[in-house]
Amino acid sequence: MSTYDWDLIERLLHEVQNGAGHSFTPRPYAEQHAAQLAAEGNPVPELDHLKTRACEYEKLLYDRGFIASRPEDEGGNGENFVLTERGSRLLSLIDSSIPGNDHPRQVLDEQADALDPDTFDELASKAQIA
């Protein structure tokens, strides 16, 4: 069973969403995530591991169709991304600013691999996950 750091993935997806004209840099985003965890009094994973994980998530999100290269006419510079429809659905499920995001994260955690495209698409199509 694959487990994911949904908070880190959420941060990465928000950075993609707001990244027109800026290069996508997962390692600094991991540092910001660690700083936020520390500021909230939460345990902080080892920073190098967190940075590596952020880079792995970037590749996974791209390879599995949650993010795609940003077109030039939308601020693309060859080093940034846009959310795909699948990525937008994922962000809407795990977004911590939306009340009740714990249940979708729990349902995702119960899957063998929640970010497997077929598994995710089937789950996301079910209204009761949200």
Image: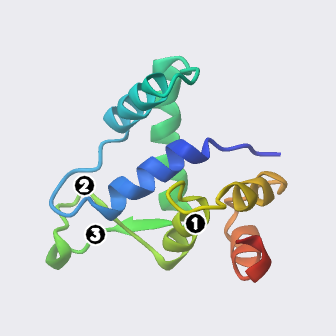
Residue at image coords 64%, 59% = 101
How far separated are the C-alphas under marks 3 and 2?
A: 8 Å
| SS under mark 3 | loop
Residue at image coords 30%, 42% = 25
Residue at image coords 15%, 60% = 21
Residue corresponding to mark 1: 90
Quadrant of the image for the N terminus? top right
Q: Position of residue 46 (x, y in %)?
A: 53, 17
* Quarter of image, res 26: top left
Quadrant of the image for the C terminus? bottom right
Decide which of tag 1 and tag 3 comes sooner along the chain: 3
Q: Nearer the viewer, residue 46 or 95?
A: 95
* 11 shown above or below 99: above
Disc 1 marks a residue whose amino acid type is Leu
Q: Residues within 10 Å of mark 3 (few under 14, many from 20)?
A: many
| Res. 79 mark | 2
Residue corresponding to mark 3: 70
Specify how the rendered protein is coloured. rainbow
| SS under mark 1 | helix
Q: Position of residue 52 (x, y in %)?
A: 48, 30
Disc 2 marks a residue whose amino acid type is Glu
| SS under mark 2 | loop
How far separated are the C-alphas under marks 2 and 1?
A: 22 Å
Decide which of tag 3 and tag 2 comes sooner along the chain: 3
